[in-house]
Image: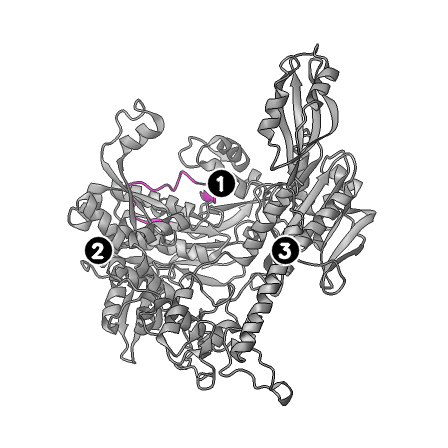
Amino acid sequence: MCLLGSFSPRHWLRIGSLAENMPTVGVKRDLLFKALGRTYTDEEFDELCFEFGLELDEITSEKEIISREQGDIKATGASDVVLYKIDVPANRYDLLCLEGLVRGLQVFKNKLEAPRYRRVSPISGDPQKLVITKETAVVRPYAVAAVLRNITFTQERYDSFIELQEKLHQNICRKRSLVAIGTHDLNTISGPFTYTAKPPGDISFRPLNQAKEYNATQLMSIYKTDSHLRHYLHIIEDKPVYPIIYDSNGIVLSMPPIINGDHSKITLKTKNVFVECTATDLTKAKIVLDMMVTMFSEYCSEPFTVEEAEVVNADGTTCKYPELAYRKEKLSSKFVNQKVGINESTEKIAQLLTRMCLRSQATGVGDEIEVEIPPTRSDVIHACDIMEDAAMAFGFNNITRTTPHTYTIANQFPLNKLTELLRHDLAAAGFTEALNFALCSQEDIAEKLGKKISATRAIHISNPKTTEFQVARTTLLPGLLKTIAANRKMPLPLKLFEISDVVLKDEIKDVGARNSRHICAVYYNKSPGFEVIHGLLDRTMQLLSVKPARGEGYHIQAADDSTFFPGRCAEIFFHGKSVGHLGVLHPHVINSFELTMPCSALEMDIEPFLGHTAETRLTHEVPMQEVVIHKFPTEVKSTHATASSKTVFGDLSTPEALNSLNDFLVDKSYVEGFVASQADTAIFDAIATAPSPTLCHLLRWYTHIKSFHGERADLPVVNKQFVLPDTPPTSTDSDEDIDLFGSGNEGDSAEAAKIKAQRLAEYATKKSKKPAVIAKSSILLDVKPWDDETDMTKMEACVRSVGMDGLLWGQSKLVPVGYGIKKLQIACVVEDDKVGTDILEEAITAFEEYVQSVDVAAFNKI
């Protein structure tokens, strides 16, 4: 979390707003300032929003919005009242209306204490009762309810009440698919209420703002053209029964999640509001109900109280809502200080959290803080959420910028680097790269390839929007075949490849699936071209430095696969393990993808060629919970006492060698390669004490390698020796007389120098007699005549009459151009040092009677 101090907080917040897809709340500026008890300039309010974790996105008006979207004519007569468009974090449901926004800002500015919300029983009589029948189980099985008693509405409060419902519907309710909110004038209906489900033909009522009654079937037809309600029809229209809520007199309150009844609609005169939420997710329903009643309970005669309602479930159990549950969490001030990058007292951090509507106090047990989380803060689910609020209250701009204790130089992920290298070389081999969607239909990866969907290990999308995107692809082949089908009119052959991820089920992974990087190539022509695909495999293996051999290299062997033609399929093995297939596709596959010509394909996994898994573990501690803090020794008692300090960088006990190593690590994270290895630990052991802070790069590396103390034995070995022995190896008796370093007497040195000079002279003489390598090129020329009456035989004779030292003419042919005109295509080989293309073209175009132009069609080095 100290990393926050390294960025501009303003930028950090904007990054967050993009990532979260923040909802926007529009409030009238004057009404907002009246509720806040003071006025602000636009700049001051923008800064206040930022401090509170919000963002003032736009300052506009209703008239300006209509003018921008519908034109000036439509905007005539619209309100000029200034509106603030404020971006709110997606999980802060308590800030989606003016009431919650003002309450939060007032508490943040210490002008108001966070209110305590209470559930109360009716002053007289039993609580309102909502009975759920078993028929609702197939559509929306859950429901919760509450009553806002003696509430006072104004036009602004009423508008905010309706807008909050809509904001919640679009946010946590997931467009009413999870939860649907219904609000009713309790004085126009009488309990107990019944929540049941009936066939659409048996449901008849007068819906909101309609003049007559309709049955549910008619309503669904009417609302298909409604710009607002048509988006929710799909939730229940295919169900055999529709959910419906009646009162004790049989009056329809609502048909969730579509429309309320007109009989119980609320108005500015409504004093008692019955709030019901039907849902497919009970937890979400409880949160939504809590938000609705807590935000507007301040307008009740007894502020911040909500009258309970009793819900009788289909199994006979009863529950009282709203829950309005408070819960308490404990955490240490040390945790907050470390994660945020500050150094505040326990009492100060408790005060910061209280400003964020989280009542907090020091317990007196060490640095422990007890935090009370209100029912309005359903976004707080972990200690990290509390820590984030403390950071926000402290002020991101007030966090001191610090340098991380451990940092590394970024390098390209090895798997991506391998992918990029292969892409370039496959393109050089004449194949065109294609990029296809990661999602596809079940048919693409199963039936069309002659397989069963159960055998594909595919990850299924739970609620696909289209049949084209039902599963995550398990193979790249269908995408390439569909690309060929869309480009069948292109000249043959079509040679395509793709290197991308596929997704496979994997029970070992915590998410139950893993990505695997595959390479796939196809060859589509009048003939299958198996030899082309086989050659591409060999070329790929050559690029990967894998030799064709069983065991230690790669080999292919015949295999049966329903995707390929019988007897024309081979399985690819690397180090004895299967990594892919290649072969000629089965005619059934060809026809399934609407192709008409044979096709060969290759697909294999490239991750095994990295030498280790592409998913590298993190080298730093990332605890899932702050329960146990692992204490590691501050000093590494390794081989410092015995390890040699002499290295390839010099004697690391000297400042000069340490400076040399520091310079070496300026742009490197490790001594060798892109991951920690035994080379790092060897150099680490050669350093007696921690480097001086002035050697920043060395200190960064030293701290990082120190964190590997528990994994040293597992680090990969290296071939190169970085640490040198203290003394050279001792010689045996048999080689005592051998002078390995030429340290004999001066006479011997002079004789040795004479012999060396003689041998160098002999080598130079021998080299001078060796013929020099002559650089040659093969050129294919297109020689175009003036018209169809040009004598092509004479033109070719003229071309061949051009003679130069280092020029050799080859074969030629006439190629039709159009309208009866043909061009001469002729090959030649030239010595690069003697003949250039410019000289050759100039000599040929000198025959103006026959030649119009000369173009180089192909140029290859020999």
Question: Disc 2 vs disc 3: Cβ atoms closer than 8 Å?
Answer: no
Dot 2 or dot 3: first in sequence order is 2
* 349 or 479: nearer the viewer: 479
Say which of 658 and 74 sits in front. 658
Q: Nearer the viewer, mark 3 or mark 1?
A: 3
Residue for badge 3: 765
Circle nearer the viewer, 1 or 2: 2
According to the image, label 2 marks what residue? 106
Q: Residue furthest bottom?
A: 733
Between tags 2 and 3, which lies in front? 3
Residue 628, image x and y in percent?
Answer: 42, 77
Task: Please name the residue that numbered disc 1 is placed on.
Answer: 232
Residue that protrudes farthest toward the top in the picture: 789
Does the stretch in magenta take in 479? no
**Residue 267 part of the magenta-drawn span:** yes
On the image, which quarter does residue 52 sit in? bottom left
Q: Magenta region: which residues? A: 254-274
Chosen colour scheme: one colour
Amino acid type, callout 2: Gln
Please give left or right for residue 817 compared with residue 53 in the image: right
The answer to whether residue 689 is above or below residue 13 is below
Q: Secondary structure at mark 1?
A: helix
Q: Is residue 799 left or right of residue 108?
A: right
Numbered badge on residue 642: none
Q: Can you say whether 290 is above or below 628 in the image?
A: above
Mark 1, Cα crowd under 10 Å, few <14 / some 14-19 / many 20+, is some
Q: CA distance from mark 2 to mark 3?
A: 94 Å
